Image: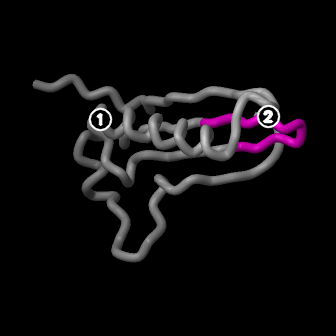
Amino acid sequence: MTLYQPEPVEISTRMRPGEWTESSLEELVTTYRARILAMGAAVSEVVTEVVRNDDGSVAVSVAWNKGAYADEAEAGAPASGETTPGQAKTGSGAV
């Protein structure tokens, strides 16, 4: 029997203005996604959120949103042509 824990796994950070560039931000998101995928997440289960605040800071979160059951991800896989939650979202406002 395998222990299945449905809680999401998240890697996140906040960076102040001047601590990041577009290039370093892209590299950070790629690294976080690779770490979550290495843990066993399917691409469709990875949710990436990048929030750019008005003060120039940025909050980055990459999460493995596991389903309630181990086999739920297969049943809930998006149909061809649908957008998956693995695509980055951008926005502004406090996190």
Task: Say what amino acid the circle numbered 1 marks.
Answer: Ala
Query: Is 67 left or right of 74, judged from the image as shown?
Result: right
- Using the image, determine if residue 26 lies above or below residue 1: below
Q: In which quarter of the image is residue 93?
A: top right
**Quadrant where the N terminus is found in the figure:** top left
Residue at left offset 82%, top offset 40%? 53
Report the residue marked by disc 2: 57
Residue 66 percent across, percent down from the top left: 38, 39
SS class of the residue under badge 2?
A: loop
Q: How crowded is mark 1: few (under 14 residues within 10 Å), some or many (20 or more)?
A: few
Residue 30 percent across, percent down from the top left: 47, 43
Q: Quadrant of residue 34?
A: top left
Q: How is colour applied across the structure in the image?
A: one colour
Q: Which mark is residue 38?
A: 1
Q: In which quarter of the image is residue 70?
A: top left
Residue 5 percent across, percent down from the top left: 32, 27
Task: Say what amino acid the circle numbered 2 marks.
Answer: Ser
Residue at left offset 36%, top offset 51%? 43
